[in-house]
Amino acid sequence: MSSLSLCAFVLAKNEAANIQRCLDGLRGLGIEVIVLDSGSTDGTQAIASKYENVRVENYTWAGHLVAYNQICTRPGLKGKYVLILDADMILTEGLRYEIAELVTKGEIQAAKAPVAMWWNGYPLKYGSLYPPKPVLFKVGVEYFVPQGHCSKLRPEVQVVTTKHQLIHDDRKPFPSYLQSQARYADLLLASAKLGKLSWRDKLRCWTPLMLLLVPLYSLFVRLGFLCGKVGAIYALDRLIAETIFYRQALASRLRADTEEKQEKA
């Protein structure tokens, strides 16, 4: 596999709890891996530097949209494919071989993989709300445009879905989860000011409805209750995330109302 026209990028910040599993999953491809580290202080860079095929670069984080588009138009890689992962994601053996086959044929623009959600090392067979994740791209095009607190593929992009799954298993401490959700909420509000929200994100901002709908959907429509405690904790995490979104939106509106009253006074 070392002859593959492929390079992998791993986005990381304080991922010491996760990055070894991510890099182990990439090892079987026999390709260069570049860890784009956004100021880790927990030993992430030291762990990554132990791998012979891994190079660590210091990287200024400006969101997934910017990061993905920068990687997909990176000088010196035109004509190649890039594999982009967050540090808490792991390639399964089947997905490694499938990606290698797609790159060898060279017929696709992009590929996304279904995501198998794990919670702190425990598989979540049911209940996950994680959509398929775009992971493989032919270099030379900016593939992403803004959507709510995140981004989406341009509609004209021809993308295939892999048969094999990508594992998402974030084992960072709970405070890190809260910080990431607060960061996503800030991005959502920034998109709201630009009028670039999906209907779902509009509900998040303007009503508390999603606080009930999201965890209930995970538990009973996606059958998360069949996973017992793990399914319940995952649904609780989604409740917390939605609460943070709504709380930040309320605080933003309160500040705007106060500023408006002060201007009128």
Image (cartoon, grey):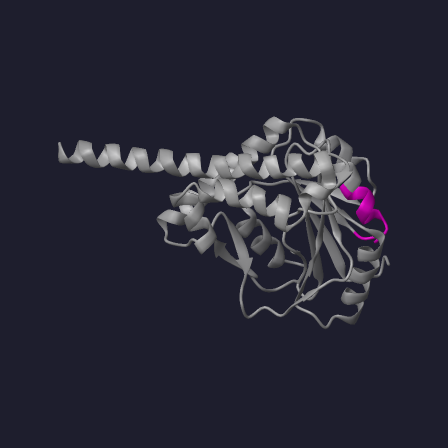
Residue at x-position 80% and y-position 53%:
31
Look at the image and tell me in which quarter the N terminus lies: bottom right
Q: Nearer the viewer, residue 162 or 237?
A: 237
Q: Is residue 61 left or right of residue 80?
A: left
Quadrant where the C terminus sits is top left
Residue 74 shows in the view: no
- Residue 59 vs 78, above or below: the answer is above
Residue located at (86% from left, 51% from top): 28
- Taking the image as shown, residue 159 lies to the left or right of residue 167, namely left
Q: How many marks?
A: 0
Q: Which residues are magenta?
A: 22-31
Q: Is residue 223 magenta?
A: no
Residue 206 lies, in percent from the top left, at 38, 44
Q: Let me know if residue 25 is in the magenta part.
A: yes
Does residue 32 appear to the left or right of 220 in the view shown? right
- Give the image quarter of residue 86: top right
For this rendering, which residue is in front, 53 or 128?
128
Residue in the foreground of this view, choosing between 160 and 8:
160
Residue 200 drawn at (x, y percent): 47, 52
Q: Residue at x 57, y 53 (%)?
A: 70
Q: Is residue 78 visible?
A: yes
Q: Residue 235's spot in the image, x, y percent?
A: 61, 39
Q: Quadrant of residue 43?
A: top right
Q: Is residue 11 above or below residue 175?
A: below
**Magenta-drawn stretch, dominant element (helix, strand or loop):** helix
The structure residue drawn at horizontal position 84% and vertical position 59%, both measured from the top left corner, is 97
- Does residue 17 appear left or right of residue 143 in this picture? right
- For residue 28, above or below residue 244: below
